Image (tube, rainbow, N blue to C red):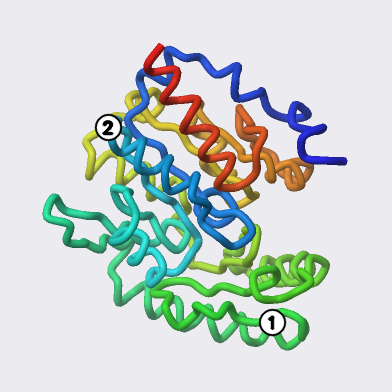
Amino acid sequence: MSISSSLDSFGLALSSMDKIACNSLRFILTDFDDTLTWEGQLPVETLRALAQLEANGIKVIPVTGGCAGWSDMIARALPVDGVITEGGACFIGRTADRHLTYSFWRDESVMRAEQANILTQVNQALAQFPRLRLARDQAYRLTDVAIDYAQDVKPAAVADKDACLAALIDMGLNAKASSIHINVCSQGYDKFSMAQRVLSETYGLSEVQQQEQVLYVGDAPNDESMFARFPLSVGVANITEHLSIMRHHPRYQTTQPGGLGFAELAEFVLSARQA
């Protein structure tokens, strides 16, 4: 089944989004890999959309399972207001003079010690799955462990990913799959819990304001905590392949995949605000 032919199976078409809701938007929180990117690249359309959203007063904050090193670059180089990184472990904020600040979910030294313990257990599990390996960016992670099954592992080791994910969960580890990695982190936080903290403590939004002024867009099962709690939620078209195994779905879906879908969303929102 093609992406385009199955869009309406779980979510509403983007065109059905209430245009009044678009006028209330102040923030777009977004996954990064395969939501802002597509086929490993950041499309020109995505970069243009990010710049246009910023110019129109909408703050974009990527919320990613990507490593802190990668997220530091995103916060410095792209027109975003900050990055929630490593699945909610840390918020890399940007001051008015473009300096970066790091705010961890718990004390940084505690989270680094937890990461070392997780890494030992993950390495033990990986001995059972020779096609899987630690992500190339593991050295640039501050809090979690990432297992590559579809980034540099080609063809994607989907069956091994599913089996490894089950094994890690059986070991009592907090493991979730993205479109390219299995991310393993300590308990107590996820994308939503850090997003809620950032929106409240950094931007002063009440829970009601978060429901009305924030939209989330993503592409994979590790976005479920966001889809479950933000009434305005969007899946880019490539999320279709995951929907059958997800409990919480985005309310709307784009017709285009990845960063092209993000650009489609940005165009719709900005057009609605001008109507």
Q: Residue 142 versus residue 100: which sits nearer the camera?
A: 100
Quadrant location, the N terminus = top right
Task: Name the residue tied to disc 1.
Answer: 125
* Residue type at numbered disc 1: Ala
Query: Which residue shows up at 51% across the image and 38% down it?
Result: 263
Task: Name the residue tied to disc 2.
Answer: 57
Query: Which residue shows up at 71% across the image and 79% down it?
Result: 132
Q: Secondary structure at mark 1?
A: helix
Whole-number angstrom distance, CA of label 1 to CA of label 2: 46 Å
Q: Residue 225 versus residue 49: which sits nearer the camera?
A: 49
Instruction: Tell me: residue 273, above or below residue 239.
Output: above
Left or right: 206, with 142 as reference point:
left
* Residue 252 position in % (x across, y down): 61, 28
* Residue type at numbered disc 2: Gly
Instruction: Tell me: residue 251, above or below residue 189.
Output: above
Instruction: Mark 1 or mark 2: name the one nearer the start of the chain.
Output: 2
Q: Residues within 10 Å of mark 2 (few under 14, many from 20)?
A: few
* Residue 254 position in % (x across, y down): 63, 33
Query: Which residue shows up at 41% across the image and 37% down it?
Result: 28
Q: Residue 156 versus residue 269: which sits nearer the camera?
A: 269
Quadrant location, the C terminus = top left
Query: Which residue shows up at 60% across the image and 82% down it?
Result: 121
Q: Residue 178 versus residue 106: which sits nearer the camera?
A: 178
Instruction: Tell me: residue 236, above or below residue 178.
Output: above
Quarter residue 20 falls in? top left
* Residue 249 position in % (x across, y down): 65, 35
Left or right: 215, with 264 as reference point:
left
